[in-house]
Each structure stands twice: as C-alpha cells, then as structure tokens.
Image: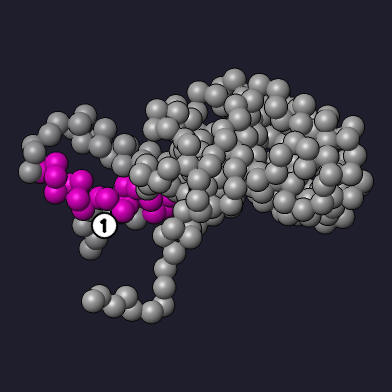
C-alpha cells in the first residue's frame, strides 16, 4: 500500500509539478523541524514550484538565445583595463536602457571583451524576463538568405523580429554584396525603435562604407543603429593574449 507521501509524489508527477516532486522530502523534513503552519508550508510548496519553473524557463530561453559558453558578467575581471569603468559597467547591467529601446555599440580592437560584455548583457536581460538573442554577423546574413527558403529559418526570422534585445556580434567583420547589405538594412529597420540592439565591431564608420560598397546604405544603417544609442569605446591589449594558456609546464628558476 502506498504511503501518503508516495501518493503526493505521484499526483505531483501527473500534474507536472516538478518543483514539488523534486523538493518534497526536503520540504516535509524542514516543515517538521521548524513546526511551521499549514499556510507557511503551502507557501513553501508553491514557491518551490514557481522557482523550479522559472529556472527551467530561463534554461530554455538561454538555449534559444544561443549565448557563447562564457556569458556571466559576475565573472567579469574588473582588473582588466579596457576603458570601461565599473560604474558604467554596473549601469549597463541594470538594463534600464532596454526599457527605452536604446542601442549599444561596443567598439574596439579584438580581445577587449566586446563579445563577453554583449553576451553577458544579453544573459542579464534574459534573467529579467526580456526576449533576448545573441547572433553573429555571419548567422544573421545566413538567416536573411534562407528565411524565404527554409521553414525553420522563417520561424527564426519571425522570432528575432519580436525580440526585446538582439545582439549582433562582429558586425561588419566581412564585406557584403548589395543584396546582403539591403537585407541587413531592412532587418535592422524592422527592429528600429521596437527593440534594442547591441552590436560589437572593430570597424570604424568609414570602414563600414567600404565593406558595404554603398555609402547610402551604410549611412542609413548607421543612422538606425546610432539613433538613441550609447557608443562604448573599448581599448587596450587583448585579454585572451594576456591570459593565454600554454600546454608546456612553466619552469621556475
């Protein structure tokens, strides 16, 4: 014959109450030790379920966001000098700029933490409940090419159009032909003032013109991105080179 605890766990499974099922033994044991009221016990039960679902939802949205492996700004090295002050860094993490559909441009040479900061701000936005996605320039261009050909690409395109925040990493890393340039402009134009963009780049606006081979499109694209925008100029030597690993043992004299 099943005990009442076993029946509760069975019911929790049927109702997809994973948080309660996972934490039942601990909650019951803690309630007995603390001699809490029925109301407090009910509160703890429901809170464990809410927390469980929130965690699962965040995991799902992080997966869809396609964040790089390293994306937690709690691990950010403030001793690394790249021109971004701690106060400015913390202000960016508050994500108030997202409420105003502000854009961010992280500009600087390779290795100055542009991608890490962009991915970290995307992760912070996800934790605050925003629809946020991280895509490289190459992924965006490929998506724009395939959205009318492959169904999954069309679904992905519509998903990004509903974003609160979209990160485009390494924008203008390579030259675009006329069709690609027009597609990128139309995409950014669709998001203009409806979502926030974070773009990372090591190219100046003058170089954008050369890579797009069209001054009109380059000017229009920059106009959409730089309107209501904070430009964060990063500088310094490459963090990766400074902290590179070696396969050889270091010998001390």
The residue nearer to you, when weighing 222 against 157, is: 222
Q: Is residue 61 left or right of residue 37?
A: right
Residue beneath the point at 70% across and 27% down: 226
Q: Residue at x 77, y 53 (%)?
A: 174
Q: Is residue 189 above or below residue 29?
A: above
Residue drawn where x is 78% and y is 37% of the image: 206
Q: Position of residue 80 (x, y in %)?
A: 40, 46
Q: Quadrant of the N terminus?
A: bottom left
Residue bounds of the magenta highlight: 12-32
Q: Main secondary structure of the magenta part?
A: helix
- Residue 10 visible to an observer of this rendering: yes
Please tell me whether residue 16 belongs to the stretch shown in magenta: yes
Residue at the far front in the pictured view:
253
Q: Secondary structure at mark 1?
A: helix
- Residue 198 position, x and y percent, is 62, 37
Q: Is residue 181 left or right of residue 229?
A: right
The residue labelled by disc 1 is 6
The image quadrant of residue 52 is top left
Q: Residue at x 48, y 58 (%)?
A: 240
């Amino acid at each position: 014959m099943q005990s009442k605890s076993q029946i509760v766990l069975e019911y929790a499974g049927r109702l997809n109450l994973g948080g309660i099922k996972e934490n039942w033994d601990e909650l019951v044991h803690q309630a007995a030790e603390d001699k809490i009221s029925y109301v407090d016990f009910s509160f703890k039960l429901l809170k464990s379920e809410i927390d469980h679902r929130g965690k699962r939802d965040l995991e799902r949205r992080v997966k869809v966001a396609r964040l790089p492996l390293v994306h937690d700004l709690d691990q950010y090295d403030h001793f690394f000098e790249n021109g971004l002050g701690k106060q400015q860094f913390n202000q960016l993490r508050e994500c108030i700029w997202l409420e105003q559909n502000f854009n961010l441009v992280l500009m600087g040479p390779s290795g100055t933490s542009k991608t890490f900061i962009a991915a970290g701000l995307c992760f912070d936005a996800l934790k605050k409940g925003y629809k946020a996605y991280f895509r490289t320039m190459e992924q965006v261009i490929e998506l724009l090419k395939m959205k009318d050909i492959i169904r999954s690409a069309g679904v992905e395109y519509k998903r990004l159009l509903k974003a609160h925040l979209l990160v485009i990493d390494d924008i203008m890393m390579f030259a675009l032909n006329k069709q690609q340039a027009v597609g990128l402009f139309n995409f950014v134009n669709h998001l203009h003032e409806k979502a926030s963009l974070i773009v990372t780049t090591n190219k100046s606006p003058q170089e954008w013109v050369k890579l797009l081979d069209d001054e009109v499109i380059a000017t229009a694209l920059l106009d959409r991105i730089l309107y209501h925008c904070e430009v964060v100029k990063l500088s310094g030597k490459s963090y990766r080179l400074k902290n590179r690993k070696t396969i050889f043992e270091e010998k001390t004299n």
